[in-house]
Amino acid sequence: MKFWMVVSLFTLALAKHERYAGWRSYYVTPATKEQLATLGSLESKLDVDIFVRPRVDREGMVLVKPQYLNEFITAMEEEGIPYSLHTEDVKARLEVDDEQIEARHTEFRSKSTTEKPYDNYVRLEAIYNYTDGIAAKYPNLVTSVTGGNSFEGRPIKYLKISSSNFQNRSKSIIMVEATIHAREWIVPPAATYAIHKLVENLTDPELLENFDWIILPVSNPDGYQYSHTNERFWRKTRSTDQSSLSQLCPGVDGNRNYDIHWSTVGTSNNPCTETYGGSKAFSEVETRIVRDILNEYLDRLTLFITLHSYGSMILYPWGHDGSLSPNAFGLHTVGVTMAEAIQKKSLPNFPTYKVGNSLLVIGYGASGAGEDYAHSIGVPLAYTYELPGLSRGLQGFHLDPKYVRQVAEETWEGIAAGAKHAREIVNRKL
Ligand SMILES: *[C@@H]1O[C@H](CO)[C@@H](O)[C@H](O)[C@H]1NC(C)=O
Ligand SMILES: *[C@@H]1O[C@H](CO)[C@@H](O)[C@H](O)[C@H]1NC(C)=O
Ligand SMILES: *[C@@H]1O[C@H](CO)[C@@H](O)[C@H](O)[C@H]1NC(C)=O
Ligand SMILES: [Zn+2]
């Protein structure tokens, strides 16, 4: 009996990554802007999945599906883009990744210290358990709000953190949104660590004296859950509509679904691709919830940050055509301040952060992104963070769990520095 249970659990675990049989991952190092742009175009052409964003002369990593392997190799050879194999057997490597996470959980259990959601890659329940616990323990400081339910009916929860119950209208509001892309597992630790630093270990009182905070650790809970239970590389939401293609290929890329030059560049109208922008702008309840929060607090919002991975980048508008907003100077200086704060706390084996307009840094355009939308409706400072993935050191598909807390801590330095600098420049304008 016991034997069979063990056997069936084992098969279940193996079956979990079965769908990635035949997938391969490659390092790519574009040498020119043109090569970088070509790589970007493969995202929609060959459904190449850009896992670590490359830059000119900085290696990135991409996932290639078996049916596109030959075309991918041909494209690399024809364009002369330097590439090399990262993992021949994606499925096997994912099993090693799982073991690392499990070993980390075990380490905490054996020390009998509570594992926090910024100590490891954790499941949705652990994140909600943590935020619910914080709201219950600090009722004068923290309010947990359910912005609505996801497509599959999961609550989308965010915390409002304020020493004055959001009543003092001279405070700036800072919003941090995370995990619209499901498989970016390093992101919720960074968001929950921000909560920890504001509520459980406030070392800089100014951050509550002058600011109110909105932190949304998982804006796409369906996708996040699915990336843990079914498909490790799931990126999109889990919605379907009436079209038969959407029944076959559920989900929308939330970061292409905002109403800002929607469905124009760096996105696809094919539901079966990773960058499908949806049947219309804001087709997804998940992005509508972010939109509604932004609109509710717009008059006091000075800084909006959406957290993603990987790339070690701080990006600002406009992403669809690379043009600069009238506030480009402010966007750039605050961006640099945040990157410097992160860098000061970072480790030598982590890549240096790059700051700039998102199209110019990434090398190709994307429309319908959250950061652009927030800025377009009037948030003076809006950014995408691409958190670090160690390039050559990244053997699997996430940083070793021992680095999770490091990333969370250094990211917080960036957010805190950004808040303070944002207030300075926005005040100066008044
Ligand atoms: C839930 O949160 C509480 C308090 O934050 C913690 O003590 C407990 O270990 C957590 N449980 C799980 C399953 O994460
Ligand atoms: C609080 O945070 C500071 C700086 O981030 C750190 O040095 C200190 O160890 C933390 N204290 C606790 C009790 O976690
Ligand atoms: C409201 O916040 C500002 C800082 O933004 C502070 O100077 C002021 O004293 C606060 N007002 C009250 C009534 O607490
Ligand atoms: Zn992302």
Image: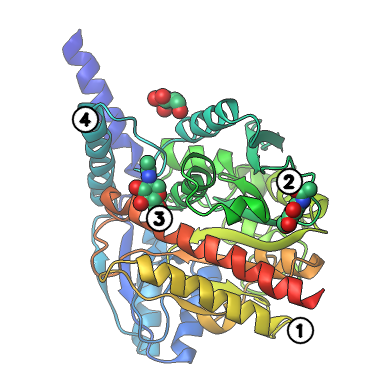
The answer to whether the beta carbon of the residue marked 1 is less than 8 Å from any atom of ligand 3 is no
Q: Is residue 76 visible?
A: yes
SS at mark 1?
loop
Circle 2: residue type = Ile
Q: Which residue is mark 1?
A: 326
Whether residue 206 sits left or right of residue 28 in the image: it is right
Residue 402: horizontal and vertical position, in percent?
26, 49
Q: Are marks 2 and 4 in contact (CB under 8 Å)?
A: no
Residue 269: horizontal and vertical position, in percent?
67, 63
How packed mark 3 is, by other alpha carbons closer than 10 Å (few <14, some 14-19, many 20 or more), is many
Which sits earlier in the primary sequence, circle 2 or circle 4? 4
- In this rendering, the label closer to the viewer, 2 or 1: 1
Q: How many numbered marks have been drawn onto this rendered protein structure?
A: 4
Residue 293: horizontal and vertical position, in percent?
75, 49
Asked whether 41 or 110 is in front, the reply is 110
Which sits earlier in the primary sequence, circle 3 or circle 4? 4
Spatial separation of the CA atoms under disc 4 and disc 1: 53 Å
Q: Is residue 61 visible?
A: no
Whether residue 31 sits left or right of residue 108 in the image: it is right
Q: Which mark is residue 289?
A: 2
